[in-house]
Amino acid sequence: MGINCLRAVPKIPPSAKHKIIISHSFSHSLLFTKRSSRAIHAAAASSSMSYEKELAAAKKAASLAALLCQKVQKALLQSDIHSKSDKSPVTVADYGSQALVSLVLERELPSESFSLVAEEDSGDLRGNSGQETLQRIRTLVNDTLANNEYSSVSNLTTDDVLRAIDNGKSEGGSRGQHWVLDPIDGTKGFLRGDQYAIALALLDEGKVVLGVLACPNLPLTSISGENQQSSQDKLGCLFFATVGTGTYMQPLDGSSLLKVHVSATENPEEASLFESFEAAHSLHDLSSTIAKKLGFKAPPVRIDSQAKYGALSRGDGAIYLRFPHKGYREKIWDHAAGCIVVTEAGGVVADAAGNPLDFSKGKYLDLETGIIVTNQKLMPLLLKAVKESLEERASSL
């Protein structure tokens, strides 16, 4: 079973505790009065919200992991490390983020059936060569817990940390509930001081029903070409969505909510294109061919990680293309959270043949050639351009 990319009628999550802003586009918003806000909350509370507790726990876990990663990245950028081949800082942050998310989810949602599909396992940390790194991870996790609301559990042993990391060994699948985590999506962006994301999703019977993207370096303002980032822009976005409720964005500090929607652009010439920053992650030449067929005028916006999904959900761009090199298999943690964040904002996520992504078959996505993301109006034109470009590429080989 694949994720349903058709939008349901949006509802306001009853867990929202802050001022709510509803918008039909990222740039035009309407501030509800307190009276209207109370009415919305009352209506939402009367409806069934199956994943309210899960969403609250996921937001808390991803936000804490973001704090941990920010601390490591800040130290990295202030250090004298100039070689990007030194991956020890991102290793510490990666494992620390996974351990922290695992611990918070288990504490907030006590259950015997806790299942986490995640990128890392503790194998490299258990040998003698990994002991120093393990101690650094333990200290970092304990410090992060102690400085927040989990001080009572901030005296974890190395065994506690290893167990938390290895909670992520689940294979997922089409039965039951499974959390899906990429503790740092965009490790190269992290090392450069650019974009990365903590991406957390929940599968229920093989469908993505909840997604949270913590993007510590993403500006709260648009990153589209006409809105160049300023050094004064506030950084740090949290995107979240549950099935049937729409997509919301708020600063990582947890202040006011903004309901977001994908771009309503119908004309490809007015659209902007997102793609992976690293050429090793996607075929930039194929994306360029597709862009030419669509009549794109603006150059592509290249950024790391699932922060692209978050930016697309609020209308910064209109299309995201990802065409990995031959032989690469997409993992579910690289797309699960981003997928529901975009679809609940009115977008469509599909493979190159237009099929919805299927997250029910374990750790990997079996899909046709690549992944394409856009709004519902542009998808037919995009699919046509993709098909023609792939056929031309095949005939030239």
Image (cartoon, grey):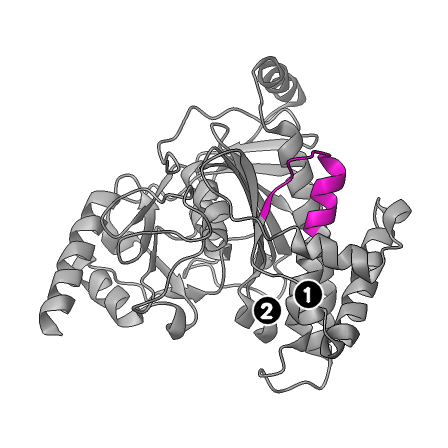
Q: Is residue 306 magenta?
A: no
Image quarter (top left, top right, bottom left or bottom right) of the N terminus: top left
> Residue placed at 65% from the left, 18% from the top?
38
The label number, if any, that marks residue 253 in the structure image: none
3D distance between C-alphas at marks 2 and 1: 10 Å
Report x, y in % for residue 84: 58, 82
Mark 2 or mark 1, earlier in chain: 1
Residue 66 in view, yes or no = no
Q: Nearer the viewer, residue 369 or 316?
A: 369
Residue underneath mark 2 = 190
Density class for disc 1 (Cα within 10 Å; few <14, some 14-19, many ≥20) is many
> Residue placed at 53% from the left, 65% from the top?
186
Which callout, 2 or 1, points to the residue nearer the camera? 1
> Residue placed at 62% from the left, 77% from the top?
87
Q: Where does the magenta region start and end?
A: 101-116
In the rendered image of this protein, does residue 368 appear above or below residue 6?
Answer: below
Residue underneath mark 1 = 93
CB atoms of marks 2 and 1 within 8 Å: yes
Residue 358 in view, yes or no = yes
Q: Nearer the viewer, residue 150 or 32?
A: 150
Q: Nearer the viewer, residue 262 or 156?
A: 156
Position of 149 with respect to 375 (left or right) is right
Report x, y in % for residue 328: 36, 65
Under circle 1, the secondary element is helix
Under circle 2, the secondary element is helix
Query: Which residue, as the protein is rendered here, is positioned at the far left?
Result: 395
Position of 7 with respect to 248 (left or right) is left
Q: Amino acid at mark 2?
A: Phe
Q: Is residue 113 magenta?
A: yes
> Residue placed at 50% from the left, 28% from the top?
245
Position of 379 with respect to 25 (left or right) is left
Image quarter (top left, top right, bottom left or bottom right) of the C terminus: bottom left
